[in-house]
Image (spheres, rainbow, N blue to C red):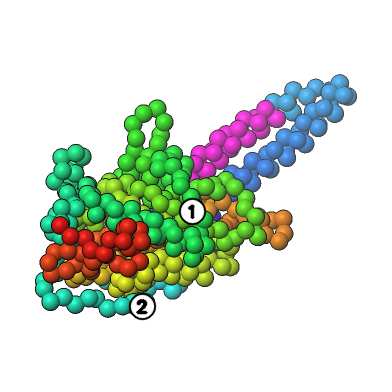
Amino acid sequence: MLSREYLRESTDAYREALKNRRASVDLDRFLEIDAERRRVIVEAEQLKNQKNVASQEIALLKREKKDAAAEIDAMRQLGERIKDLDVRQAEIEQELHDLEMIFPNAPHASVPVGPDESANRVERVWGAPPSFEFEPKNHWDIGEALGILDFERAAKITGARFAVMIGAAARLERALINFMLDVHTREHGYVEVLPPFMVNADSLRGTTQLPKFEADLFKLQGEKEYYLIPTAEVPVTNLHRDEILDGDRLTISYCAYTPCFRSEAGSYGKDTRGLIRQHQFDKVELVKFSRPDTSWADLETLTANAATILEKLGLCHRVVTLSTGDMGFGSAKTYDIEVWLPGQATFREISSCTNFLDFQARRANIRFRGDGKKTELVHTLNGSGLAVGRTLVAVLENYQQADGSVVVPNALRPYMGGIERISK
């Protein structure tokens, strides 16, 4: 959520941000009722002062045993008007809040302006795509031939966009999770947390999934309004909702493994085969709570931490800055890390690393106290470190062999019990 001061005082800048984002929101209505709110507050305060003066005058008349009926009637009318103004102020506050919740964040000046992913900017590339003496296969063909991925039985058990991992694939998924957590906690200094996999609506509002993106969520039936988490960003960021943090503790860095659940609304027809776009998938998430003066440096660190996983696995990848038309609703700036997939002969996103500035913190009321007594909003950041299923896809496709087997990367062999090759 953006501050009202920014929307009020930087209207032209925000209009330009909305234009660059291809976003349509009713900023004029916000400005109109925001102005009305201030008029209502001023009038209510003036009338309350008049009421206080009238009350003193009535008390004086009564002490002097004079008739105060007219003054009492006038004060009653003042009270009724004040009540009407209080009701109107509450209505305005609710409408303002509803509008603010659907206003996207303003992109940072360094974000490339463009309509969609075609305007994304490649920042750097690590490694080179592997060369093969045969036509490389897609991961679903590799996995099915090895007997380690089963999409048909998953569809029988549940439905489309689910998978069953069997034997070496299940072990590889578990190995990747443990490998990622070990690197981030032991080498990068993150504190591991294991949060609930269900959250309440307040948590989703705090991290911007509600109200705008409810269609992407799985809501549970029952007495309580719970949702399955779309990413560990939600429970981990909300660890400190409605808290005032000690500024000396910042930057706070957490990592968490969780399954994630997404309806993939609007993605029908896209990536219908394989593990790229599933309703349920595993992810290791990185979350940071930063001071405003360090959050941009922290974004660079977080992105580098996520990319380290791919470097250790020997997987070619690139870092891309998303354009204004491709970035997420709450993002001020996002780096996508894209890994090379030989079976598709293209780079595919495996992590999005984002600085939200104080956008989430204002919604979730997460503050810190620095050197003085005044509190400030923290800056929140997060990124996948990494999406586990997509990393498994990258391993299968990049390390496939002519005989259909898959070589296990050296970094994962200790987590695979020393297995060097996955064969049928």
The residue singled out by tag 1 in the image is: 192
Q: Residue at x 23, y 63 (%)?
A: 421
Mark 2 or 1: in front is 1
Residue 306 visible in the shown view: yes
Picture disc at residue 124: 2
State the SS at label 1.
strand
Where does the image place residue 381, in percent across and percent down from the top left? 48, 60
Rendered view: 398 above or below 201? below
C-alpha span from label 2 to label 1 = 29 Å
Q: Residue at x 17, y 64 (%)?
A: 405
Query: Could you tell me the amino acid type at mark 1?
Result: Glu
Relative to the observer, which residue lies in front, 100 or 326? 326
146 horizontally vs 367: left or right: left
Please identify the dominant SS of the magenta region: helix
Query: Could you tell me the amino acid type at mark 2?
Result: Arg
Quarter of the image holding residue 109?
bottom left
- Quarter holding the C terminus is bottom left
